[in-house]
Every structure is written in C-alpha cells, then in structure tokens.
Amino acid sequence: MIMQASFAGKTLARSLALGGALLLGATAVDGSTGTATAAGNAKVIEHPAREIKTRELIAEREGLKLKLYEKWRAGSEEGWKQNGKVVLLIHGATWASKCTFDPDPEHGYSLMEVLADAGYDVFAVDLHGYGRSERTDADWTDAVSAAKDVEAAVEFIRALRWVERVHLFGYQWGAQPTALYASSKPQKVARLALLGMRYKLIEKTGPLPVSPIRTLGQQASLLKPEDGELDPEFVRRRAQVCRLEASQAPNGALRDLYKASVVEPSKLKVPTLIIQGERDGSPEQFRDRVQFFGEMGSPAKWFTYLPGLGKYAPIERSHARFDQALLSFYDQQQ
C-alpha cells in the first residue's frame, strides 16, 4: 500500500514499513498498534490562569555543578508521586535551558509553563559548559559526556520527587544525549520524546573545530524569517534572554555532526515519540529520522509529523500544535 506524504512542499509517495506501522504524512503513527491519528488539527486544551512557581537548583556529577530550572503549577505537588507527571527537558547545541524552553513566558513562549500548567513538575538542565553550569577541560561536551549530565539530573529529580521514572524531552542535538541515556537506563525513563533526532546522516564536512569553546555573538541569537513562522518582536526579546544566559558554547555538539549518531536505536526500549516538523530539515534528514524510527527497539513508538512547523517548533507562532502533541504523548500513561 502506498500513501501520499507532503514534506517541504514536495510529494513523497512511498511505502514505509516501520515495525508493523506505516508512516503517514501529517499524522502520528503508533508503532505498537499500527494505528494513525491526525496531528495537524490537534485540539488545543486551554486552562484557566494558574499560579506558576519557579526555582533554581544544583545537581552534581563528578565534581561538576549543573544548573537545573524547575517550574510547576501551585497545588499540583501532591499528585506527582502517584501520577508520575515529572519531566526533564534537554536543550540543543547552541543555547542553554532558559533561552530554549522558557524565553518569554509573559507572552506565551515557554514550553516549561505549558507543561507546568498541565500539572507537570518541569525541570530543564544546563548541560556542562552551557548556561549557568560549570565546564570541564576533560571533554568538549559531546553527546557521550552530556549523557552523564542527563543521568545526574534524572537521579537528582528522582530523589527530590521520590519517583521511579522521569519523562524526557530532547531538543535537536539534545536528542542525542537524551536518547543515549534512555537506551542505557530504560528502567528510569517513563516516556521519551525527541525533536530533531539524527541517525546516520553526516551533517558537517571539512575541518573539525579546533577549540573546545566558541563565542556566541549577537547574530547567533537572532533567528531569521526562514527559520520558521516566528513573531519578530518575540525574536528580539528571546535574543536578549539568550545573550544574558551565555556568551559561549562548547564545540562538542558540532564535532558530533561530523559523524553518525552514537545512539543505537535497537537499544531504545522505552515508549518513544519522534516529532518531525514539516520545515525541520531537508528530505535527507527526514529519511534519516524515518530510518531511526524504523530501527527502534521499543514495542511502543510513535512518529508525529507536524505540518508547517520547523526546528523551532516549541517557540513558533503555531507552537500550540507542538505542545499538544507532546502533552498527548506524555498523558497516555495516565
């Protein structure tokens, strides 16, 4: 059977056998049942205004101090141990947690607040060398070393909230250490969501970065029209948050792009959602993510395709569709 899937304005007609499921354009595919549901027209659940609390915490691993940010809705604390609504967010290659997940909550641009308002205890970690976390000369913060940060953050959260497992979300390059950790410690992961996952595709060629650190100038913080359906005023506000958060970033993530992913999809056994925005990457990147999905070892896996959204899906104008896809996945455990 051949289905029609629209990607980046072009029609892809192909049959994709994915662990018993067929990938459908603009749909979410359930790899455990083979059923598909529309993701492009998700109904957004609106909550009345609630008090959102926030604080900063410190986790440690091998002598390194890691900054953790936490947000939650007042009054939801009593339920987390029973309902397991505890989630950790892991940022990408350039900017740390606040710039990525909580850049402009006053104007509705905060994935942390979206999840908190839905009753989740939400944490975001600055990987070592990023944001307010310490750095080390022992490595350049590649996916392998960053996975240890994810582990340290998860252990901290499990002890703090007395829960056995934590939900994880890995954003762009952050999907690499997140998936690597989940494949090694499945008993501590409830559900895993990944946006911008890369598998065998080599995204960079030429000379490798020679310095462990790169400077982040003003241009690095300013997004462009082709980056997605973005509010220009928000882009300027976000840039200020990003520059206040950090002026440098490690180059380990860039070096990772010169080789295939260290994640072996066959070792992923936890319920996993792969999110693909229509404008997030090239057709080659799309096929690479499809291959990763097909080789995943989890008996419960989903591939959600979001029309119109790109790599900045959590902060684009239509981020509500991304928010709902993520919440629907996490809420399935309830």
Image (cartoon, rainbow, N blue to C red):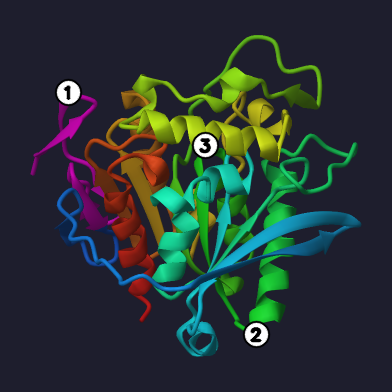
Q: Which of marks 1 and 3 is nearer the N terminus?
A: 1
Most distant residue in the top direction:
206
Q: Which of 244 and 316 is in front in this view?
A: 244
Q: Quadrant of the rendered structure where residue 210 is?
A: top right
- Tag 2 residue: 162
Dots 2 and 3: beta carbons under 8 Å?
A: no
Q: Which amino acid does label 2 sit on?
A: Trp
Identified at 36% across, 59% down, the residue is: 326
Could you give the CA–CA distance between mark 2 and mark 3, rounded to whole angstroms? Answer: 34 Å
Q: Which amino acid does label 3 sit on?
A: Arg
Residue 297 in the magenta stretch? The answer is no
Q: Which of 206 and 2 is in front in this view?
A: 206
Q: Does residue 38 appear to the left or right of 156 in the view shown? A: left
| Span highlighted in magenta in the image | 1-29
Identified at 49% across, 85% down, the residue is: 75
Could you give the CA–CA distance between mark 1 and mark 3, rounded to whole angstroms? Answer: 32 Å
- Position in image of residue 195 (x %, y %): 43, 45
- Tag 1 residue: 10
- Tag 3 residue: 238
Q: Quadrant of the rendered structure where residue 2 is?
A: top left
Q: What element carries label 2?
A: loop
- Position in image of residue 304 (x %, y %): 28, 50
Circle 2 or circle 3, nearest the eye: 3
Residue 18 in the magenta stretch? The answer is yes
